Image (tube, rainbow, N blue to C red):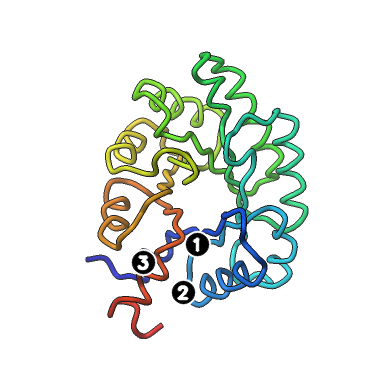
Amino acid sequence: MMDPKEILKTVDHTLLTQTATWDEIRQVLDDGIAYGTASACIPAAYVRQAADYVKGRLAICTVIGFPNGYHTTETKVFETKDAIANGAQEIDMVINIGWLKDRKYKEIEDEIRKVHEACGGNILKVIIETCLLTEEEKIKMCEIVTNAGAEYIKTSTGFSTGGATFSDVKLMKEHVGPNVKVKAAGGIASLEDAEEMIRLGADRLGTSRMIRLMQNTDAGAGY
């Protein structure tokens, strides 16, 4: 079993529900700081308040084109620039899945590249929503994300028909370029699942549950 602290270092501690209040987001930030997570992933409307609150003690991540991905490229670029200006250090964007079904590969790659440029050197993670894709489409997106220069490819929003699977993490790890990392998100329900995702090649885990799991086990003692 991995050291729980090492698992937590990979976690984007996430709260993206539509009903999320500032009090709930503040708790996520406090827990992220206390448990040493990689970031807190929160709604864009709270980024400035969160960045002011954590004062550099925790990276702030937010989502772009979320959760459906069919915003215009210009809208996604504006969202990204606004989030970065408000203090976000990491951006998780959703691809236009209809474009992928239409085989508009150049348009998808151009959009990712433009959003990446808007990140201004900050981390971009590209959500491909694996539960809606064929294996061929997943492999194609590994190629596109690699070519576009994003830092991460991410399995899921957590708002569709399924989340991360072991097989998808393994597939993505095998097909991305050497400069692209894998983020598994959605439905990671146990420490064992988290450890297996990391073993298969995930560098980040997007989850709202991991700290609660730590708190409910002996592994969390001492925090």
Indicate whether 215 appears above or below 43: below
Left or right: where 97 falls relative to 76 = left
Relative vertical location of residue 137 with respect to residue 201 in this rendering, above or below:
above
Q: Residue at x 43, y 46 (%)?
A: 183
Q: Residue sitting at 54 percent across and 61 percent down?
A: 39
Above or below: residue 176 compared with residue 49: above
What's the CA distance linking mark 1 and mark 2?
A: 10 Å
Q: Which amino acid does label 2 sit on?
A: Tyr
Q: Where is residue 64 in the image (x, y as percent from the top left)?
A: 64, 42
Quadrant in the picture for residue 9: bottom left
Q: Earlier in the sequence, mark 3 or mark 2?
A: 3
Of pointers 1 and 2, the one earlier in the residue sequence? 1
Q: Which residue is identified by label 2?
A: 35
State yes or no: discs 1 and 2 in contact (Cβ < 8 Å). yes
Marks 3,2: beta carbons within 8 A: no
Q: Nearer the viewer, mark 1 or mark 2?
A: 1
Q: SS class of the residue under badge 1?
A: strand
Judged from this view, the residue extending furthest toward the bottom is 222
Q: Which residue was labeled with disc 3?
A: 6
Task: Name the residue carrying label 1.
Answer: 13
Looking at the rendered structure, the secondary structure element under dot 2 is: helix
Residue 119, position as x, y percentages in the image:
68, 44
User: Which of pointers 3 and 1 indicates the residue nearer the eye?
Assistant: 1
Quadrant containing the N terminus is: bottom left
Do labels 3 and 1 touch, CB within 8 Å?
no
